[in-house]
Image: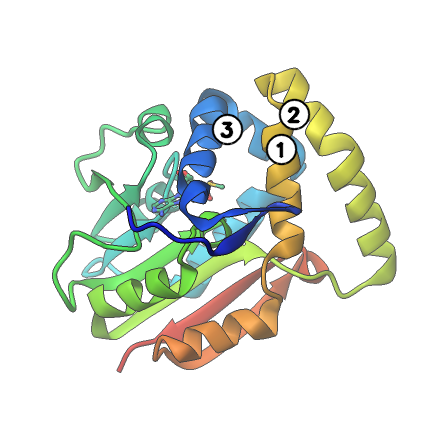
Amino acid sequence: MKKSFEKIDFGFTKININKKEKLVNNIFDSVSSKYDLMNDLSSLGLHRLWKQELINWIAPQSNQSLLDIAGGTGDIAKLFIKSGGKSADIIDINFNMLINGISNDNRIRYIVGNCEKLPIKNNFYDRITIAFGLRNITYRQLALDEIYRVLKPGGRFICLEFGVVNDDIVKKLYDLWSFKIIPKLGKIITNNEDAYKYLIESIRMFPDQDKLSSMFIKSKFERVKYKNLSKGIASLHSGWKF
Ligand SMILES: C[S@@+](CC[C@H](N)C(=O)[O-])C[C@H]1O[C@@H](n2cnc3c(N)ncnc32)[C@H](O)[C@@H]1O
């Protein structure tokens, strides 16, 4: 690892940039066995609707290959195959997250690796997705450059991530739920309140929908657009490579 004195956000705390990857990995190691249950409880099931919306936007075809980045327990890859896609590869830096969601469907393959340096040749996949992964990555622009590199010309990339809420009443309720309830649920279910504090804080520190669009454009994606889900609690960003 290169020595750097640069600082980066880790939730609301500033840390040395070299430390983020390890801290994020520790979090997912600690919550991996209860990750799916916590997703259902903390989002009141909404994450399933948002993931389905991502799949609807992709509209999988029987000749399409997918790479799901930071795929964790594999929801997106499984939905892609169920909806008619040809094959789905999942890459995640965390072995325990992959193991906790492993499928015996041989159309789904697993890669343990860092998406800042994808072990994949240029122009390889028809579709690439990332769901709730980007904000956990240290070098996000580098990851977007890598995604662009391994996407085939004519291919599409879609990112599902938390966003900035555009409705005052929803924002009040959402903040209350996020800061008061989710960390407590995290404590009861995973015995790790701090992990869920980080996850909530990291959402608030993540670039808003327009800034994320600019990051897509910086990595050369074209026809970049986004749509808000549940008043902006989450959003889907789409970009093409031509
Ligand atoms: C919040 S989980 C999302 C999992 C899954 N995509 C979902 O939507 O349920 C974030 C995932 O990003 C992975 N991750 C974080 N940094 C990564 C990196 N640099 N390269 C690959 N995966 C990474 C974590 O290990 C974790 O599994």
Q: In this view, does 84 lie above or below 95?
A: below
- The residue labelled by disc 3 is 35
Q: What residue type is labelled 1?
A: Tyr
Q: Which residue is drawn at 46% across and 43% down?
A: 20
Q: Nearer the viewer, residue 7 or 152?
A: 7
| In the rendered image, the vertical position of residue 190 relative to residue 72, given as above or below | above
Query: Residue at the location (38% across, 30% down)?
Result: 97
Asked if labels 1 and 2 touch by Cβ distance under 8 angstroms, the answer is yes
Figure quarter occupied by ligand 1: top left
Of labels 3 and 1, the one closer to you = 1
The quarter of the picture where residue 179 lies is top right
Residue 47 left/right relative to 139: right
**Residue 115 at x, y = what percent?**
30, 52
Q: Nearer the viewer, residue 154 or 219?
A: 219
Which quadrant holds residue 201?
top right
Q: What residue type is labelled 2?
A: Glu
Q: Is residue 191 above or below residue 124?
A: above
Residue 93 x/y as whole percent? 32, 39
Q: Estimate how packed mark 1 is, as few (under 14), some (14 to 19) or many (20 or more) residues with alpha carbons within 10 Å.
A: many
Badge 1 marks a residue whose secondary structure is helix
Residue designated by label 2: 193
Check the picture and name the quadrant holding the C terminus: bottom left
Would you name the residue on which mark 1 appears? Answer: 196
- Residue behind label 3 places its C-beta within 8 angstroms of ligand 1: yes
